[in-house]
Amino acid sequence: MIHNPHLPSQAHGDHGRVKNYVDGEFIDSESPRQQEITNPATRTTLGYVPLSTSSEVEQAISAAQDAFEEWRETPPNLRVQPLFRLKTLLEEHYDEIARILVQEHGKVIDEARGSVRRTIDNIEFACGIPSLLMGDTLEDGAAFGIDEEVIRQPMGVFAAVAPFNFPAMVPFWFWPTAVACGNTFLVKPSEQVPLTQERLFQLIDDAGFPPGVVNMVNGDKEAVDAILSDPRIQGVSFVGSSVVARYIYHNAARRGKRVQCQGAAKNFLTIMPDANLDAAIPNLISSFFGNSGQRCLAGSVLVAVGGVADELVERFVDAASRLKLGYGLDESVHMGPLAAERHYDRVLRMIGKGVAEGARLLLDGRHPQVPGYQDGFFVGPTVFDHVTPDMSLAQEEIFGPVASVIRVADLDQAIDLANFSRYGNASSIYTASGKAAREYKYRVQAGNIGINLGVAAPMAYFPFGGFKDSFYGDLHGQGKDGVNFFTERKVVITRWL
Ligand code: NAD
């Protein structure tokens, strides 16, 4: 057993191996394949995650399918009762979950707490499902004496495949709504950060869902492929890179499944000459460097319009250089490490590429001094100036604490630049002009627009998804889109003689 004083012992399986949760039981995977879980700040081993076999995924789907018939018959007001209990349990274990998250992912504790709050928001939304499931009726809709109504029905077993960057929250964008709608569910967490989900599933178990309603299987591509090929899976919600999003979209859709795939991002943040820089700078710093840049809504390109550029860049670099790096459990730390070695290597490679392509490196975050944590995967805030649209820095997702400044003459050029990107997850404008903000809001091709704020994250009541290569599918996650995704709408036309 690997000892870590910060992790509850039950966060591991008996042999430091994470368990699956199937049919209301925590079970050991029999897969010979497993992967180490590492604390990215200390590089200590936290445990091992099994890479489950396709037959283990099939067993979980069987449990979910068996549970479906009774669960769909359970009235919505009763279906939400375990969700209410789960919300209370999460409030009680709020800080404990945040601390596990810091250890396996590297976030700083406040970011971790924020993401647990968003996790809870999604449960609260799903608790309102009895109202959200109410259909539409039209008296005499078809003719005199013939009424028409829409009823919403659950469909069966759904699954979610999650990324590494929000280990608690992302599966909760989907499963509470799906389950409240009367479906049953299988969560496949990111194999890189499975400990937070394991602890959350212990609380899900305590909340008292009937066995088989919510299940979890750990794994990698083999597990995902088993989900995609199983005819009992009605739909798949995916969040992760665009390459895998495309793969899942094609392979789920060609088998007739519903599918919503949230992919990668490259977010452009535009600063107009009339922006209030005192308010904008701390907000921009949080957007570009919060979560060490590993947020699909993080700023990536800082678009300086007209005369604002010199002052903006000077103040932005100054503020960025003051951020304190360290282990996220220390409350005074602003930025943690990248979540794993492969991300660390990629970010260093991208910084090297930026230098090679001729961008001007104003702040170099490579190999920072982090006393006590020299082995961690730390990259400090990095700022490039005079980036041009043809450079990799302007085109590729970096997913690290790297800001690229592009200088443009006016708002039209800023909008063209944002729209030139193959991605369209989020974009923001900082301005005092309602007219400029309105132009931006209507013309920029992105799913989430920020006006004077740098992380345009929709609350649980709103749909969340991007445009272009940031999203494949039609109905987004969260909000009423989620309710539509997880229900079949049936029209009933009635005449009583
Ligand atoms: P990833 O695509 O590598 O992995 C995501 C999931 O897919 C994991 O559960 C993994 O096991 C599975 N997977 C990986 N390779 C697979 C394959 N070949 N076949 C089948 N399944 C496979 O993504 P990641 O590195 O975990 O997450 C980072 C990415 O997620 C970034 O691109 C980021 O922008 C994106 N992201 C997007 C949003 C959004 O809302 N658009 C939110 C969070 C993260």
Image: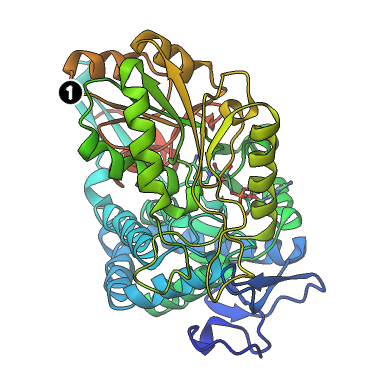
Q: Which residue is drawn at 32% across and 65% down?
A: 83
Nearest the viewer among 243 and 127 is: 243
Residue 253 location (% of width, % of height): 64, 33
**Mark 1 sits near ligand 1, with its Cβ under 8 Å away:** no
Crowding at dot 1, Cα within 10 Å, few <14 / some 14-19 / many 20+, comes out as: some
Name the side, left or right, on which 235 lies relative to 269. Answer: right
Of residues 495 and 35, which is closer to you in this image? 35
Q: Where is residue 121 in the image (x, y as percent from the top left)?
A: 29, 56
Tell me what residue is drawn at x 57 percent, y 54 percent. Answer: 379
Residue 242, picture quadrant: top right
The one of 323 and 204 positioned closer to us in this rendering = 323
Indicate the quadrant containing the C terminus: top left, top right, bottom left or bottom right.
Answer: top left
Q: Which amino acid does label 1 sit on?
A: Ala
Q: In which quarter of the image is residue 491?
A: top left
Q: Mark 1 — residue?
A: 432
Q: Is mark 1 on a helix, strand or loop?
A: loop
**Rendering coords of residue 412 (x, y %):** 37, 8
Residue placed most toward the observer, 135 or 43: 43
Q: Is residue 377 left or right of residue 223?
A: left
In the figure, is residue 40 to the left or right of 250? left
Residue 165 seen in render:
yes
Tell me: residue 147, above or below residue 398.
above
Return the x and y of residue 181 as percentages of the image width and height: 37, 51
**Residue at left 38%, top 68%?**
109
The N terminus lies in quadrant: bottom right
Asked whether the viewer can see residue 178, the reply is no
Q: Residue at x 56, y 59 (%)?
A: 368
